[in-house]
Structures are given as structure tokens and as C-alpha cells.
Amino acid sequence: MSNQLSKFFFVWLILIFSSILSIIPLSENLSFLKIPWVALSLLFFTIMTPSIIGLFSAFLIGLILDILQGGILGESSLALSFMTYVAYRFRLQIRVFPIWQMMFAVLILLLINEMMHLWIDGIIGKIVISQSKIISVLLGSLIWPLFMGLIESLQSKIDSR
């Protein structure tokens, strides 16, 4: 199998796995631990390997996420596509940031994703602002270095084969 094809399958395997992680039910008390895994995965691959992932991939994984979560069809697609576009636009700058600046950039991008969800929910009249969503975005940006290190180590093992 070619190197480019194995990278493509690796990216989609991570995206599908992160989609599965995002639909794991948690109790109301633990809902703040619902980290936006799909958004983190898309951000990583958009910033680090933009030739493999793009807006269409973000739109497609958003549709899959909407189907899995039973939400409004297209809500996650729009939010993830917009977040991916902004990340793609600034990927060269974000890529060379020190880790603390990269964490801040990821926080801003995850907040953009949540604001898009909030905007769409407001349009349909289902606006719910909860602390658990804000905390989950903060946790997502805090675990970014660990997440990035894990994916990079898995990617290097795939590349060494």
C-alpha cells in the first residue's frame, strides 16, 4: 500500500474513532468531560497534514456526527467546516507556534466551533448555554499537547512501516 494511501486510511480511522468517542453517553454530572474529539482530530490533521484532509472531509465527518448524535442534519457539518476553514487559513502560523500559543489557538478554534453550534441552535429556537460545554472546550485545549503527541507518535509508527 502506498504511503499516501496509508496516511489517508490512518486519518479516517482516527476521525471515525473520535466520532465513536463523541457519542459515548455520560451522566449529567460528567457532561463537562465530553471533549470535542472530532474537532480536535480535524484541527490536528488540518494544521499538520492539510494535503490529506480538507473542507469536504470536515463536512462529511460532520454529517456522520449529526447522524450518530441524532441532531439537526448539517449543524455539525457547518460548524466543523467553518472551524476547519479558519484552521486551514492560519495553519502555517499555528504550526510554528510554541505549544502554549498553539493551545490558545486551538481554544479559539474550538470556541468558534461551539459558537457556530450556539448560533444554529439559536436560529431554530433551541438555545442552551451550559457551563459544561465551555469546560469541555477548555479541557479540549488543555489536552491538545497530549493529543498531538499521541497522534504524532501513531503517525510516525505508520510512516516507519
Image: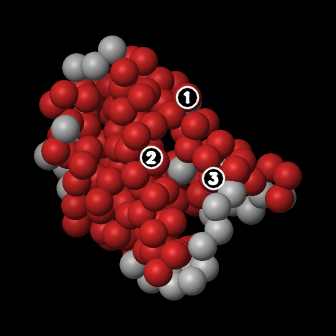
- Disc 3, SS: helix
Nearer to the camera, 127 or 93: 127
Spatial CA distance of label 3 from label 1 is 14 Å
Cα gap from disc 2 to disc 3, whole angstroms: 11 Å
Q: Earlier in the sequence, mark 1 or mark 2?
A: 2
Residue at 74%, 62% in the rendered image: 25
Instruction: Say whether marks 3 and 1 touch (CB < 8 Å).
Output: no
Residue of label 2 = 110
Could you classify mark 3 by the number of other residues whose Cα lies within 10 Å: few (under 14), some (14-19), or many (20 or more)?
some
Q: CA distance from mark 1 to mark 2?
A: 11 Å
The tag on residue 133 is: 3
Please indicate, yes or no, whether residue 1 appears anywhere in the rendered image: no
The crowding category of the residue bearing disc 1, from other C-alpha atoms within 10 Å (few below 14, some 14 to 19, many at least 20), is some
Q: Secondary structure at mark 2?
A: helix
Q: Position of residue 65 (x, y in %)?
A: 49, 69
Marked residue nearer the N-terminal end (3 or 1): 3
* Identity of the residue drawn at 42% across and 63% down: 116
What secondary structure is found at the residue carrying circle 1? helix
Residue occupying the far top of the picture: 98
Q: Left or right of 21: which side holds 84? A: left
Instruction: Determine whether 59 is above or below 91 in the image.
Output: below
